[in-house]
Amino acid sequence: MDQIVSLSRRRGFVFPSSEIYGGLGSTYDYGHYGVLLKNNIKARWFEAMILERDDIVALDSAVILHPRVWEASGHVEGFSDPLVDCRTCKLRFRADKLEDSQCGRKPSKHPGETPECDLTEPRQFNLMFETTVGPVQEEGSRAYLRPETAQGIFINFKNVLQIARRRPPFGIAQIGKSFRNEITPGNFLFRVREFEQMEMEFFVQPEESERWYRYWIDERLNWYLRYGLRQSRLRVREHGPDERSHYSQGTSDIEYLYPIGWSELEGVANRGDFDLTRHTEFSTTKLEYVGPDGERYVPHVIEPAVSLERIIVAMLVDAYDEEVVGERERTVLRFHPQIAPVSAAILPLIAKSEEMVSKARSLYEDLRKRQSVEYDDNGAIGRRYRRQDEIGTPWAFTIDEQTLSDETVTVRDRDSLAQERLPISGVRSWLDDALEQDWKTPKAD
Ligand code: GAP
């Protein structure tokens, strides 16, 4: 994890937030390549969940919803973790995760293990961030930053049913920020207080819910394989009955083998009719499906839910590689080409050659209309290649002496390091084809 954190910072993917003020624990800002990476992951999710399907529509609901939403959802009452304070070291821990925490005075021990540890009794701590709506803090002005995007979907169920004229099975998907005042955030982006969720609520006939639950576990697992995560580092773990959330009739985690061990990447839950029933009760608006022949029922909901942050950590860890090429060590991120922040680099071999620079610039200006490409004429060519390897750029096109005589360029492959020549006029379609093709992963399983 340390290598990933250090590369992310060095290459401008992710910075610790508010650094000039001493930092705000476990809060991060995304730099240029981090933003490009996030955009690609969101785009691939959006394609798979919405654009490539007929049965799912998009939504972008508000972050601050009516406070009653969170009463109906059960978050006001039940979205809490048990917390203990240590009177000696003044640190706070999750009472149910003491074995994963370190004692503040003796980091080799867990809280409660040394004679000096003086832990309070556990008390429940609600994870929702509170805020005030309107200029004064008064009765009735309390609201919350959403701890999940899902509730914004449930409260729009009727709108989508009527206006988008859908009938089950159909889904509503959204991407947006969620906020949780986690007691023990950490492990880089894995557990943070502000994160971007990608959630989809799929409404089905009650008797079909088990089939769709299994279907979505497979779909989501295949999405990770499609975008290059190693099969050997992915597994599905079904929750036991005492582990499930209050709303769940069945939950499976898609787990990834992170450097901290097997941990939840994405959750797929069968939420039954809990949410629509509760919002019907609390809002008094009937949330049900009424068919053309008068049949009526409350659909059951299957929910795949993940955060970009957990995907980013998994993709960085999976892509990270170090190897020796010739005499030199290189660090390379073997991202799937459709995930890589930059698809191709355009490099004039000699920055002082006006002809090479002008050809490289015009190729770059042509390609950047459609792809995320980068022009770089700074430093020795070997150093420029290594820079691109470290941000995971799959291909580099180099304009050299020969280009000036025969209008060809070399293309260098990030993984095999093979180089081939192709006409400069064919680069655009070569790159389009390369991005379209099925990716053969260079990673060992
Ligand atoms: N709507 C259901 C729901 O939010 P969850 O298991 O609490 O369920 C869903 O969260 C996903 O959101 C998780 O599988 C994980 O990918 C992500 N997630 C949850 N808490 C997170 C945190 N503090 N930091 C980063 N990602 C988080």
Image: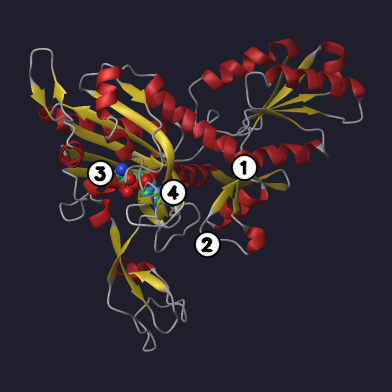
Residue toward you, 331 or 44:
44
Mark whose residue sits in front, 3 or 2: 2
Mark whose residue sits in front, 3 or 4: 4
Asked whether the beta carbons under mark 1 and mark 3 sit within 8 Å of each other, the answer is: no
Could you tell me which residue is drawn at 73 percent across and 10 percent down? 425
Tell me the residue that label 1 is attached to: 332
Asked whether the beta carbons under mark 1 and mark 4 sit within 8 Å of each other, the answer is: no
Q: Where is residue 288 in the image (x, y as percent from the top left)?
A: 16, 28
Disc nearer the start of the sequence (3/2): 2
Q: Quadrant of the C terminus?
A: top left
Dot 2 falls on a residue whose secondary structure is loop
Spatial CA span between label 1 and label 3: 33 Å
- From the viewer's perspective, is 98 left or right of 395? left
Tell me the residue that label 2 is attached to: 25
Asked whether the beta carbons under mark 4 and mark 2 sit within 8 Å of each other, the answer is: no
Tell me the residue that label 3 is attached to: 252
> What amino acid is at disc 2?
Gly
Spatial CA span between label 3 and label 2: 30 Å
Q: Position of residue 105 (x, y in %)?
A: 47, 81
Residue 389 badge: none
Residue toward you, 438 or 2:
2
Residue toward you, 360 or 329:
360
Could you tell me which residue is drawn at 37 percent across and 70 percent down? 93
Quadrant hosting residue 130: bottom left
- Residue 256 visible in this rendered orientation of the protein: no
> What amino acid is at disc 3?
Ser
Mark whose residue sits in front, 4 or 2: 4
Tell me the residue that label 4 is attached to: 134
Spatial CA span between label 4 and label 2: 29 Å
Quadrant hosting residue 17: bottom right
